[in-house]
Image (cartoon, coloured by chain):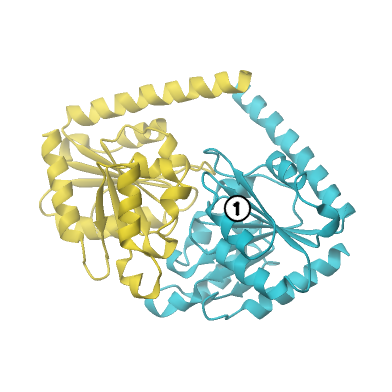
Chain colours: A yellow, B cyan
Amino acid sequence: MMKVTVLQNIMNANDQLAAENLKLLDKYKILSINIMSSPGAGKTTLLLETIKRLKDKMRIAVIEADIASSIDADKINREGVPAIQINTGGQCHIDANMVKSALDRLPLKDLDLIFVENVGNLICPADFKIGTHKNVMLLSVPEGHDKPYKYPLIFTTSEAVIISKMDYLPLSDFDVKVFKEVVTGLNPGARILPMSARSGEGMEDWIMWLEAQLKQVN
Amino acid sequence: MMKVTVLQNIMNANDQLAAENLKLLDKYKILSINIMSSPGAGKTTLLLETIKRLKDKMRIAVIEADIASSIDADKINREGVPAIQINTGGQCHIDANMVKSALDRLPLKDLDLIFVENVGNLICPADFKIGTHKNVMLLSVPEGHDKPYKYPLIFTTSEAVIISKMDYLPLSDFDVKVFKEVVTGLNPGARILPMSARSGEGMEDWIMWLEAQLKQVN
């Protein structure tokens, strides 16, 4: 039983810190979005394309999480947007404390929108609150439409579900209709957004969704 | 410090059980392969294609792990090969105890080869020994060639690294040469196998690699 007690305490401490992060973000009227997916589903590409379209309209920063390396933060920085890299050192998700330490290093009074790019993983990130306003997940077409059956939690805790790499659809047996039905069954309120960063398909709907969320924190 | 101690004890208990699993498999001269990848990289498809090619030559069983559902075990069973489904109930990897309980349900004296399909994840499975002879991982072309930088451990602990979904290469900026160089830098002994289950590319090399491993346990 000791193991359970210790883990319970860790979760409670994390949830408290997450609530403090959210309070801080609300104070500065910053919308914060937690982006989750498998490795290589296109989180960084989505962020780069989003930044290109929004950076003249609003002030954006990114918190990048990875087990190791700063490849993604370097890419974001090249777009002229501040990016803080978190290396989890083996941990399969970020926690509220890591996000807090990144927020401490960002110029919050000069920001409107913060993206947190979580570690590439469909499992652990769904278990840990980090104190962001919205969860967004990507599932890429090559991963297959059966993933909601196998990893249900992340689909039920995401306010928006992006189907990324729609340009791979002609080569794939991904069934968009079945996928939408299953996700809606798990999470009736989820906004499902088919997208291809390469062709630009779906980017306009995504930007409109983001702008609607922004209004809610202002 | 208590948290660390508890985790240390869990790891030691797991490693002991893993050693017992391996001893049991050696006793029955069964080759066991732990298959790891991101969600949707093609583990089940690889197994189905491998079973088609080998089931008349040797006796195969599969241990299927998922957070939830029995979709993959059902697919394997349809090939006429016994498959035991493990549901981890949220845990991001399987452990030696789960494999032990699955081995207890398999007819070991009638088997030559057991595949364990781990949970779809590039992080947690690499941390836990389960008592198999060899680790094999798949990275699919759409995931991108930068993944060894971000998830180094799984690449260093795998004896074979399969580049799956090679049929997506014309649509992708995946650089096979760079990927091979980085993997070889991390893990000079790793066998790197480009593969497409759809076209059949690379399947012959993979089967030859498996047959060479089989000789080592006999």
In this view of the protein, which residue sits in the foreground, A43 or A4? Answer: A4
Q: Position of residue B115 (x, y in %)?
A: 69, 58
> Split into 4 quadrants, where in the image is the N terminus of chain A?
top right
Please name the residue that numbered disc 1 is placed on: B153
In this view of the protein, which residue sits in the foreground, B215 or A34? Answer: B215
Number of numbered tags placed on the structure image: 1
The answer to whether residue B63 is left or right of residue A151 is: right
The answer to whether residue A157 is left or right of residue B155 is: left
**Residue B118 in view in this figure:** yes
How many C-alpha atoms fall within 10 Å of the one at disc 1: few (<14), some, or many (≥20)?
many
Q: Residue at x 81, y 67 (%)?
A: B214
Q: Position of residue B208 (x, y in %)?
A: 73, 76
Which image quadrant for residue A106?
A: top left
**Residue A38 in view in this figure:** no
Q: Residue at x 36, y 35 (%)?
A: A99
Secondary structure state at the residue bearing disc 1: helix
Which image quadrant for residue B204?
A: bottom right
The answer to whether residue A88 is left or right of residue B184 is: left
The answer to whether residue A11 is left or right of residue B210 is: left
The vertical placement of B173 against B124, above or below, is below
Q: Position of residue A104 (x, y in %)?
A: 31, 32
The vertical placement of B56 against A83, above or below, is below
Q: Residue at x 54, y 76 (%)?
A: B196
The vertical placement of A54 against B142, above or below, is above
Q: Residue at x 34, y 28 (%)?
A: A18
